[in-house]
Amino acid sequence: PDLISHLNSLPATLPRIDVHKGMDVATEAYSGFEGSPSLADELKRLGIGTVLVVGLALDYCVLATAVSAKKAGFRTAVALDACRSVSP
């Protein structure tokens, strides 16, 4: 099944965490972990050990977020079919 079908099949009781990055014009943030300093702590508090990264700017934001997740100790995967690159 495709990623959207898989995500829609997950229980609605799973925690939802919205990541907001790049909100401060004076601070450049590519990683979702940079924009949300407590994201790693919150995921660990919830017992989450795996991070699936999706989004735009595969070659910038998605890459930076995946690297940050791995450095924070999470099992990390990138869903390439749910990403787009800035560069062709």
Image (tube, rainbow, N blue to C red):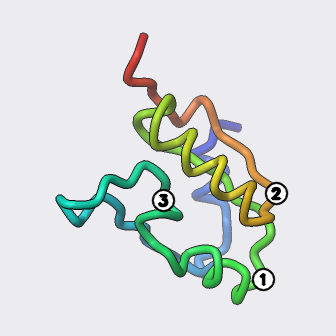
Question: Can you name the residue that lies furthest to the bottom here?
Answer: 45
For marks 2 and 3, give the CA distance.
Answer: 16 Å
Labels 2 and 1: the sequence-earlier one: 1
Q: How many marks?
A: 3
Numbered mark located on residue 32 in the image: 3
x then y, percent, for residue 81: 58, 30
* Tag 1–tag 3 contact (CB < 8 Å): no
Which amino acid lies under the numbered mark 3 shown in the image of this protein? Answer: Gly
x then y, percent, for residue 9: 66, 60
Numbered mark located on residue 47 in the image: 1
Labels 1 and 3: the sequence-earlier one: 3
Which amino acid lies under the numbered mark 1 shown in the image of this protein? Answer: Gly
Question: Can you name the residue that lies furthest to the top here?
Answer: 88
Quick one: 79 or 38, which is closer to the camera?
38
* Tag 2–tag 3 contact (CB < 8 Å): no
* Label 2: how many Cα within 10 Å (few below 14, some 14–19, many 20+): some
Labels 2 and 3: the sequence-earlier one: 3
* Tag 2–tag 1 contact (CB < 8 Å): no
x then y, percent, for residue 28: 32, 53
Q: Looking at the image, which residue is at 35% across and 61% down? A: 21
Which amino acid lies under the numbered mark 2 shown in the image of this protein? Answer: Arg
Label 2 belongs to which residue?
Answer: 75
* Label 3: how many Cα within 10 Å (few below 14, some 14–19, many 20+): many
For marks 2 and 1, give the CA distance.
Answer: 12 Å
Q: Looking at the image, which residue is at 73% across and 58% down? A: 71
Quadrant of the image occupied by residue 26? bottom left
From this view, report whether residue 82 is shown above or below residue 77: above
Quick one: 21 or 16, which is closer to the camera?
21
